[in-house]
Image (cartoon, helix red, strand yellow):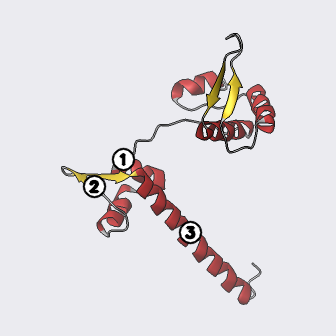
Amino acid sequence: MPAKPSSRRAAQSGSISPTKRERRLAAEASRLFPHTRGSLNLRVPGARGTSVELPAIAARLLRDVLTHLANGDAVAVVPTPAELTTHQAAAILGVSRPFLIKALDAGHLKVRMVGTHRRIALADLIAYRDAMDERRHAALDDLTTQAQELGMGY
């Protein structure tokens, strides 16, 4: 029977799956973690009282990572460039590349050509994803309302 993957083994493959002890520690840390929107000062142990100030965005990411680890979720930190290929953009949206190409060709999303290759700005992709999510939620709300009006038990 193969050994259960440890967080160290998972870290070598790109994502981190917490052990039971790490889940417990992450849960304790996330409960103590400040819920402020500002920066965070951390004292570095063993560095003679040296402290470092984390910017607000890093503090938010750290809180999110701790929360996911406490829930037992695997976590991977992946840097995302400001411009994406169609393959990267499709992966972020969770759609096929041909679906994305059709959306680009229809003008639903801005695209910049680099030679014969398409590049999508991350900010535009996120705005498109959010708009798709809003339309999806609105459609689901409409279906729920219709089902309730028809007495379908929803």
Residue at position x 73%, y 40% in the image: 71
Q: Amino acid at mark 2?
A: Arg
Find out whether the residues at labels 1 and 2 contact each other: C-beta distance under 8 Å: yes
Residue at image mark 2:
112
Marker count (numbered): 3
Q: Characterize the local packing of mark 3: few (<14), some (14-19) or many (20 or more) Cα atoms within 10 angstroms.
A: few
- Secondary structure beneath disc 2? strand
Check the image and name the residue furthest to the bottom. Answer: 150
Residue at image mark 1:
83
| Residue 4 versus residue 63 in the image, above or below | above
Q: Amino acid at mark 1?
A: Glu
Q: Quadrant of the N terminus?
A: top right
Residue at image mark 3:
134
Residue at position x 76%, y 36% in the image: 33
- Secondary structure beneath disc 3? helix
- Left or right placement of residue 80 versus residue 67 in this view: left
Going from N to C along the chain, the mark reached first, 3 or 2, is: 2
Q: Percent position (x, y) of residue 130?
A: 52, 62
Q: Characterize the local packing of mark 2: few (<14), some (14-19) or many (20 or more) Cα atoms within 10 angstroms.
A: few
